[in-house]
Amino acid sequence: MESGKIEKLLERYDEGKTSLAEENILREYFLKEDVPEHLKSYQLMFMFSAKQKKETFENLPDVGGSKGNRYAWTSIAAILIVALGIFFFNDSSRELNENDLGTISDEELALEKTKETLNMVSQLMNEGTADLAYLKEFNKTTNKIIQID
């Protein structure tokens, strides 16, 4: 095929005005071995496109992302189950009957039980404040150091 016709087709190709038949003519021309030196860059381009056209994918990537969707729906279902469980099962434990309260009918016995309970709370509080003595010593030492500087 004459070089002038190929160059005109290349100009039209560069402008995007060629038909598919004309592009096939160009592709067939550039797949030959004997191409002029000034058109070698086009030969590389058409050889690459011919090679890409022959390639096929055997294992197509998973576009749908089914694992991601499954994970999202599983998470949503778990959240709903937990929320419904908290709402329905925890609500029944809030109802208290008068029989559930530990009532004592004898006033003196109730007073003794109250004193015992308050004494126990007081002992626990005193145990917690005993450790604060070390903290007071630490603060005194810190204040001395700060006043020296």
Image (spheres, rainbow, N blue to C red):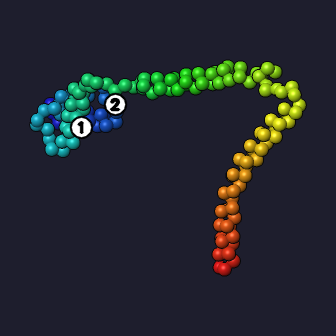
Q: Residue at x 67, y 19 (%)?
A: 88
Q: Mark 2 or 1, which is nearer the eye? A: 1
Q: Give percent across and percent down for residue 52.
A: 24, 30
Quadrant containing the C terminus in the rendered view = bottom right
- Secondary element type, mark 1: helix
Instruction: Please state if 78 lies on the left or on the right of 5 as rendered.
Output: right
Residue placed most toward the observer, 74 or 84: 84
Q: In the displayed image of the protein, which residue is found farthest to the left?
A: 34
49 left or right of 99? Answer: left
Cα separation, mark 2 vs mark 1, equals: 18 Å
Q: Looking at the picture, how far across and down is residue 48, in whole percent?
A: 22, 35
Q: Of the residues shown, which amino acid type is indicated by label 1?
A: Met
Q: Residue 23 appears at what percent x and percent y? A: 26, 28
Residue placed under numbered mark 1 in the picture = 45
> Which dot marks residue 17?
2
Quadrant where the N terminus sits is: top left
The residue depicted at 86 percent of the width and 25 percent of the height is 105
Say what amino acid the circle numbered 2 marks. Answer: Lys
Observer-nearest of 117 and 29: 117
Q: Is residue 131 above or below residue 43?
A: below
Quarter holding residue 103 = top right
SS category of the residue bearing label 2: loop
On screen, residue 134 above or below 121: below
At 73% across and 52% down in the image, what residue appears? Answer: 126
